[in-house]
Amino acid sequence: MDGVLMDSTPSVERVWRTWAAQHGLDPDRIAPLAHGRRSIETIRAVAPELDAEKENVIVEQMEIDDKDGVMALPGAAELIAHLPPERFAIVTSATRPLAVARLGYAGIPVPRRMITADDVTHGKPSPEPFLKGAALLGFAPEDCLVFEDSPAGIASARSAGMKAIALQTTYPADQLQAANAIIGSLADVKTTFRDAGIALEFAPLAIAKS
């Protein structure tokens, strides 16, 4: 969702830098770690001495309240509008309240099918989120294609047995090499329908090495 359908980077950076400063932690180290991961897991990793569940509630509300700069990325609304609702799901590290809030800020409809941080025990890079997304759609993992912007998300998709297309919206290409290919944004994707199938056509910026 974040970095794929919408740009929430300014909000994420502001919230995590503020939270880090409040706890005497290094904002420059912590802010980059927050992308593509559940916030509770970021907190556990960087501040194991804190009550992660309590801090997670605080961080989530800060993220919900900070909507400045949250906007749809190029091609996102168009792709969502062309895909049959039963054929795609959002799999996000955000909680459902945060996901719904950010989709609203970006003007993107909440889809019928969504896996959020509330639905999993282990977040990305664990394969659990995408495996649950595939199950929600009723497809085998190997028949699913994932669009991701973060190394953690790509690792999650690939370990679930799915092909992953990386978007160079949040991280540079050299950190996205675990994906099958790299594109600039969803504006580079063209959707066509062939019989019962969906063909997604794009010209990648790069074919990843994996």
Image (cartoon, rainbow, N blue to C red):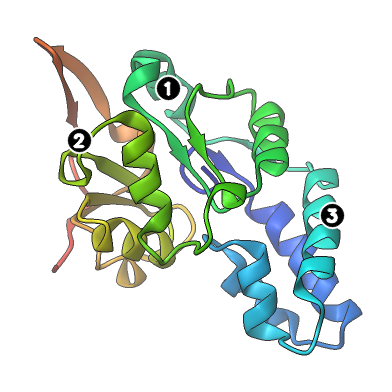
Looking at the rendered structure, the secondary structure element under dot 3 is helix
| Image mark for residue 202 | 2
Q: Which of marks 3 and 2 is nearer the N terminus?
A: 3
Q: Which of marks 1 and 3 is nearer the N terminus?
A: 3
Q: Which residue is drawn at 74% across and 80% down?
A: 27
Q: Which residue is drawn at 67% across and 79% down?
A: 44
Give the residue number, with chain letter if any, for mark 1: 80
Mark 2 neighbour density, 10 Å: few (under 14) some (14–19) many (20 or more): some
Q: Residue at x 43, y 52 (%)?
A: 129
C-alpha gap between disc 3 and disc 2: 36 Å
Looking at the rendered structure, the secondary structure element under dot 1 is helix
Q: Earlier in the sequence, mark 2 or mark 1?
A: 1
Mark 1 neighbour density, 10 Å: few (under 14) some (14–19) many (20 or more): some
User: Given this view, does label 3 or label 2 mark the residue nearer the observer?
Assistant: 3
Q: Which amino acid does label 2 sit on?
A: Phe
Query: In this orientation, which residue lies closer to the viewer: 186 or 45?
Result: 45
Residue 206: give x, y in percent of width and height: 19, 56
The relative height of residue 159 versus residue 62 in the rendered view (above or below) is: below
| Residue 148 visible in the displayed image | no
Residue 163: give x, y in percent of width and height: 20, 50
Q: What residue type is labelled 1?
A: Ile
Give the residue number, with chain letter if any, for mark 3: 62
Quadrant in the picture for residue 177 = bottom left
Residue 92: give x, y in percent of width and height: 52, 47
Disc 1, disc 3: CB below 8 Å?
A: no
Quadrant location, the C terminus: bottom left
**Residue at the far top in the pictured view:** 195
Looking at the rendered structure, the secondary structure element under dot 2 is loop
| Residue 119 visible in the displayed image | yes
Q: Which amino acid does label 3 sit on?
A: Met
The relative height of residue 23 versus residue 178 in the rendered view (above or below) is: below
